[in-house]
Image (cartoon, rainbow, N blue to C red):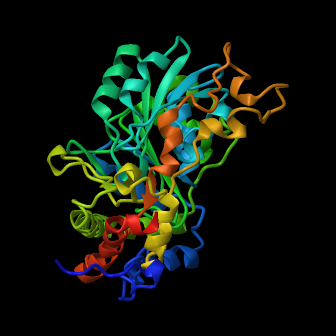
Amino acid sequence: MAKKEKLAILGGPKAIKSTAENMFTWPIITKQDEKAALDVLRTGRMSGLDVTMKFEEEYAKWHKTRYALCHCNGTSSLQAAMYGCGIGIGDEVIVQSLTFWASATQLYSLGATPVFAEVDPSTFTIDPNDIEHRITKRTKAIIVVHYCGYPTDMDPIMKIARKHKLKVIEDVSHAHGGLYKGKLVGTIGDVGAMSLMTYKSLAIGEGGVLITNNKEIYERAIAFGHYIRHPYTLTIPPLKRNEGIPFGGVKYRINQIASAVGRVQLKHYRKRMETIQKAMNCFWDLLEDVPGIRAHRPSRKSRCTMGGWYFPRGLYVKEELGGLPVSKFCEAVTAEGYETTHGANFPLHLHPVFNDVDVYGHGKPTRIANTKRDVRQPKGSLPVTESMPERTFDIPWFKHYRPRIIKEHAKAFRKVAEQAEELL
């Protein structure tokens, strides 16, 4: 048996010897992107709609949906999706707590309130078994988040939603191009919404997009924040007769420089996404038998994929490593040449904004301002969600398939896990 290399944190050689080059550079910007952006800039069409509408047409075609509606950011696209679904004062909406705040906070501006559900400990997405018992007469919708690129288990959720006549909003911000049983995420619920900001897997600078096959959701979203489109888009009488001023008092038009870049990025995205998937699966294949760490990815037989694999994580099982804290594990991996950290998003149900803050001057916390019951969820109420910061860790997000570099990074994680006893 070959002698194991001493851990770098204890004075041994680093596992990662190669320079990363552009393995982690994102987005990939070419002369095509630059030309598209400059064409808009030089013609002064930054606030126009012609380029944006072409981008929307191409985005909808990719998803095989009737409608796509661009927004200035992902947060506004999610809020428009909520309004499109008719969410309003006194409504409750079920959503996971382990997510970025944009999945839930806009409910406040509509007079609604989030009710947080648990996540599945393996997928980090909302647990279908923790939804139905939270439904009340006030429940209006379920928001699912394809968190860290992992497709939510949609079939049981759609069954619950149809049974209780609830709308389903998909937050696809982490999962552009991901598949759930062969179907593109964002096309399974009533409406999908997503961020396209600089760090997402489909990155156009800053922007968001809403997709749906539902005409009412689409037109309500336009009525809410796209006043310039009212005259030639609105057909539903209650919306049409009140056109001209955005119902939400907001202007959510995307800048056409971002739309122009988006058209180019979309053209190349599927090929780049396939390369990312190949690289990321290669990384996890190399670590399949390593104790203490688990791949956060669907099985290949599931017909589910991770899209562009945004915000990639691993699952940490400290019991298999003698109880070694994940923080110490990450410190040792960092010493091997890849700077990693542990954790995920802070659980929303524990944040003061969802417990104590009076946002609009109601005289009581906004979370319960429009409800007839106290829906706040204290520490200990969602134990799986609360355990996730100590059960997840960051892994490299490779943008190119270069086996030598990928193997060195995998070696760093393997080396630490297999010598965990040296760190205890």
Q: Nearer the viewer, residue 78 or 151?
A: 151
Side of 42 relative to 395 (left or right): right
Side of 301 relative to 50 (left or right): left
The residue located at (45%, 58%) in the rendering is 324
Q: Is residue 231 visible?
A: no
**Residue 40 location (% of width, % of height):** 53, 73
**Residue 164 location (% of width, % of height):** 40, 15
The residue located at (63%, 39%) in the rendering is 105
The residue located at (29%, 52%) in the rendering is 297
Side of 211 relative to 153 (left or right): right
The residue located at (35%, 27%) in the rendering is 157
Vertical position of residue 358 compared to residue 323: above or below: above
- Count of numbered circles in the view: 0
Q: Quadrant of residue 32?
A: bottom left
Q: Nearer the viewer, residue 296 or 302?
A: 296
**Residue 355 location (% of width, % of height):** 71, 32
**Residue 316 location (% of width, % of height):** 39, 53
Q: Quadrant of residue 376?
A: top right
Vertical position of residue 246 compared to residue 208: above or below: above
Q: Is residue 156 visible?
A: yes
Q: Nearer the viewer, residue 73 or 253?
A: 73
Q: Quadrant of the N terminus?
A: bottom left
